[in-house]
Structure formats: C-alpha cells, structure tokens
Image (tube, rainbow, N blue to C red):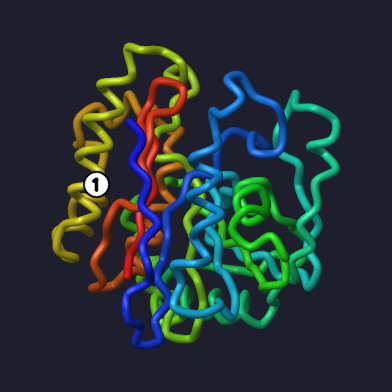
Amino acid sequence: MTQLKHEAAPASNGRMPAFYIPHGAGPCFFMDWNPADAWNNMAAFLKGVEATLPYRPRAIVLVSGHWLEPHFSMTGHQRPELIYDYYGFPPHTYELKYPAPGAPDLAAEVARLLEENQLSAGVDAVRGYDHGMFIPLKLMFPAADIPVIQLSLRNDLDPRAHLEAGRAIAGLRDQGVLVVGSGMSFHNMRGYGDTRYTPLSAEFDDWLTAAVESEPEQRMTLLQNWVQAPHARDCHPPRAEEHLLPLMVVAGAAGDGPGRKVYSEEIMKTTISAFRFD
C-alpha cells in the first residue's frame, strides 16, 4: 500500500524542518525502469518537499549514505563536481548535471561546531557531490541554485556519534539551513524483490516510525539502539547500515522537535519511508 502525505508547512518560528529521505536506486528517476512506474510515487514525494517548507532555504547540509570517512568531513569546494558512483546504468545517466554551488564558509562552520562538541571533523576541499546528493536534489530543488555542502558519515558507523553530530549542528536550522539525510530506510541488496522480506521490512518500518514519533529523549535512546529493533539486521546487514545512519544525524538535529512519517510505500517488495522533524 502506498502512503503519501503532502502536508502544508506548519506555522514557522523561523526554524527549518529536517528530513530523512530515500534517494532511490542509482539514477532510477532519470531512466526507464521495469515496471515503468516503480519510482513515480517516491519522485512525487521528493518533488513536493519544497512546497512544504516555511521559506526558501539559505543553504542545505546533506548527509549521504555514500560517503564514509574516519572522521566527519565536509565538502569545501566552491563548485563541487559530480561523482557518478553508480555502475551499469545507461550512458545518459553519467551525463546528468546538478551545478549547485558549494558553501565553504558553511563547511568551516559545521566543522567548528562538531569540533566544539568533541567530534573530530575537517573540510575536504576537493571532494565532489555523490549521487546520494545530486539524484534526490535534482527532484527537490531542480534549479540547483541553493548552496549545498555534504557531510560525511563516520566509518565506525556508531549511531551515538551520528546523533551527537546532528545535535551539534541543530542550531543551523534557525539560520535557514535545511538538514537532509539521504539514504534508504530498508537497504539490504539481497532483500529487494524478495517477498520473504516484505513482512520483515514492514515490521522494522513500524518500529522505526514509532521511534521517530516518540518523545525526543526516548527517540534518541531508541535510535541509538536501533539494532535491537525487530529484523534490524535483515533490513540493514552488519557493516552495511550506512543508508540508515543519515537518519541519526537528522534526528539529532531535530532537537526537541517532533518527528513524523511523511512518505511510505512498498517498492521492490520492501517498505521504504521518509521522515520529517519540525
């Protein structure tokens, strides 16, 4: 069953919401697929995000499941190139463009905030944007005119550290910065298309939704201990949870704000969802 919600933005006190979004499979939104409408609802959700915002973001901090480093790193180039880090797709998908400007000053600010919270961080002045960034943002903000920095995951995959990283940058939301976590709430490559994973992914998704919608203190505890969720390792195998961890950063950045599911559907026999924090 498909569940889609395109809600009007609530009355704003100036704070940007934060989102954990699915970014699909490689360049799936920009190519033929079988079935042809497989990604249509997800694309519609992503295209609708901008209309739910209280105002135009000043900048975007995006955490992608496709960048892991020993310590938290930020893109610091003024004009980052694209990294086509997907394989075996049609030639035209390696010609996709997303010329969003970088934001070196914001990258330095994020590094400073993390360091002040005892989280080692640095700015990478060379790295470009990976497809966890440019594929969904081409749908969300197609004009590519909002400055963006990518924030890496830490390759120890420690959920607590990623929650703390989000908490460290939460104040940026009051400055008009949109925080986005880009991944997939189910990401077991062996499970896609396998009906045995349909009930497992649904049960995990129910747990994840309840965790996100819990009171903030309980939410942090539950997400820090996400491996205790039902079928957690069926949905995110060991050392392969990099597509879930962007949610931890976003939930940390949520502070005391409420979280809720804003999109969910069954794709390739598994449940995939998105969450918003206000």
Question: In the figure, is residue 180 to the left or right of 164?
Answer: right
User: Where 270 falls versus 133 (above or below)?
Assistant: above
User: Where 277 falls versus 225 (above or below)?
Assistant: below
* Residue at 37%, 46% in the rendered image: 4
User: Where 180 falls versus 237 (above or below)?
Assistant: below
Q: Which residue is mark 1?
A: 209
From the top left corner, tell me how far across and down residue 212 is, in percent.
24, 54
Quarter location, residue 80: bottom right
Q: Is residue 70 visible?
A: no
Callout 1: SS:
helix
- Number of numbered markers: 1
* Residue at 21%, 38% in the rendered image: 206
Q: Is residue 216 visible?
A: yes
The front one of 201 and 1 is 1
| Amino acid type of the residue tagged 1 in the rendering | Thr
From the top left corner, tell me how far across and down residue 190 is, in percent.
47, 17
* Location of the N terminus (image quadrant): top left
Q: Pointer 1: residues within 10 angstroms few (<14), some, or many (20+)?
A: some
Question: In the figure, is residue 276 to the left or right of 59?
Answer: left
* Residue at 36%, 35% in the rendered image: 2
From the top left corner, tell me how far across and down residue 39 is, in percent.
55, 34
* Location of the C terminus (image quadrant): bottom left
User: Where 113 falls versus 272 (above or below)?
Assistant: below
The front one of 31 and 97 is 31
Quarter location, residue 148: bottom right
Question: In the figure, is residue 142 to the left or right of 67?
Answer: right
The front one of 54 and 105 is 54
Question: In the figure, is residue 244 to the left or right of 87?
Answer: left
From the top left corner, tell me how far across and down residue 105 is, in percent.
66, 82
* Residue at 76%, 57% in the rendered image: 98
